[in-house]
Amino acid sequence: MIGPQDLGGREDFGPINPEKNEPLFHAPWERRVLGFTVAMGASGAYTGDQSRHQRESLPADFYLSANYYDIWLTALTQLLKRLGMVTERDLAAGRGVDAPLPAKRVLKGADVAAVLAKGFAYDRPATTQAAFAVGDVICTVSNPTPGHTRLPAYAMQKRGVIEAVRGCHVFPDSNGMGQGEDPRWLYTVCFMAEELWGKPGPDRVCLDLWEPYLEPA
Amino acid sequence: MPHDGPDHDHSAGSELSPIALRVRALESILVEKGYVDPAAVDAIIETYETRIGPRNGARVVAKAWTDPDYADWLKRDATAAIASLGYTGRQGEHMVALFNTPTTHNMVVCTLCSCYPWPVLGLPPVWYKSPPYRARAVKEPRAVLMEFGVMLPETTEVRVWDSTAEVRYLVVPMRPSGTDGLNAEQLADFISRDSMIGTALAGVPA
């Protein structure tokens, strides 16, 4: 979906204004949001792609103006409500009123270091041959799905060259909709800036794209 | 119950902002329901406040500058080469290192969200997650670089990497001249966070 998150190439956002000596957090509540969002991410109750899809489904005016940790907080609250893990009554009371759903996993404090260090690999054993090889010229499809996707609008229906084959990876278009991992071949594809933006020059933009986004040119 | 007037709510008299109250409410719910261990929340915060940050990435780059075999490994298999220094895990499961050269300058963005190589750079700065950088980095990287004080020759190719999958990119900036006698730990001081995102050069204050 081309939601408010799909920002590449959009105009009129103004200067970047990086903050000098930016602190890691700008308020104590941001630390807590980081902490419980990462902790819940390890719970197995939903996938990272589902979190992303929830965030990009937020209203555009909110998404484009909010503190990023507020985007996390608001989307996490909505996702947990949708899953039935948190209820309106809990939120109204500001505490756990309704009975919890059974938890798949609870990340314990003592396990944090090991779990963070291990991470969550997204590559999966290949069950098909890769359709493309390094150097192949491809064309990207138009918006492949109305749900979650990682093909940005600016790179749709463009001609590029396969730069690298990254293996089979969990497919966000399926995983983000709660429909399973459905691993697909993942490629890094480079596009000339001229192809994307119509301005000549030596510059390139490279994206990681799954096989269903690509067609032979 | 003198406080329970008709207009009373949880925020009345509180010094916490509305969002801080929302955060506290959700955290309380998650803890009371048994979904979250408060000790885990504390440990996660402490990890990113004290142990995981851009100094990790700077050590990777400095080692690549001083050890050709390591640089070669980093080019071929960045995940393993970076893991050998102890930097692994969340948001860095699949790493690729991008080596800047006199003819190619690399720069990383995530136009769709905020993907960033946490094990080597820590948490992303606000500007990296904000609409102006995400919108402009892919379309006008040279104008963006100018705002960061970086001007490149027109013949240098700017290569922008949009992190659309779970592959995370670390830019290896070029080693500044005049640093020949320095060891890896001294060199790490020259390697800023932004130089490993690609919005700065090494050896130039951010």
Image (tube, helix red, strand yellow):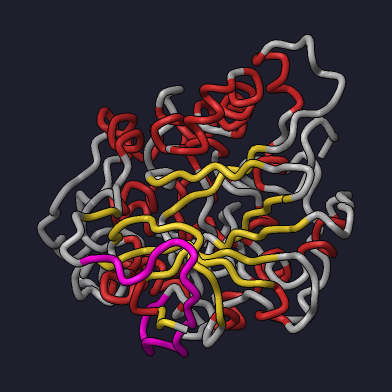
- The majority secondary structure of the magenta stretch comes to loop
Could you tell me if residue A186 is visible in this image?
yes
Residue B108: percent from left, percent from top: 63, 55
Q: Nearer the viewer, residue B169 or B3?
A: B169
Residue at point 31% right, 71% down?
Answer: A131
Between B105 and B125, the residue placed more toward the observer is: B105
Q: Residue at x 70, y 57 (%)?
A: B127
Magenta residues, as a range? Answer: A129-149
- Seen in the picture, residue A198 relative to A8 is either above or below; the reply is below
Q: Quadrant of the C terminus of chain B?
A: top right
Q: Is residue A74 magenta?
A: no
Eyeballing the image, is A155 above or below A91?
below
Relative to A215, does residue B26 appear above or below in the rendering? above
From this viewpoint, which residue is outermost toward the left? A102
Image location (x, y in percent) of residue B111: 59, 68
Instruction: Identify the residue shown where x is 54% and y is 59%.
Output: B114
Looking at the image, residue A13 sits to the left or right of residue B107; the answer is: right
- Against B206, residue B5 (above or below) is below
Of residues B49 and A131, which is closer to you in this image?
A131
What residue sits 88% from the left and 59% below the top?
Answer: B154
Q: How many marks?
A: 0
User: Residue A215, image x and y in percent?
Assistant: 40, 83
Q: Position of residue A58 (x, y in %)?
A: 48, 79
Q: Is residue A59 left or right of residue A77?
A: right
The image quadrant that residue A182 belongs to is bottom left
Q: Is residue A140 magenta?
A: yes
Instruction: Give the quarter of the figure containing the N terminus of chain B.
Output: bottom left
Q: Is residue A72 visible?
A: no
Task: From the viewer's side, name the closer residue of A18 and A1.
Answer: A1
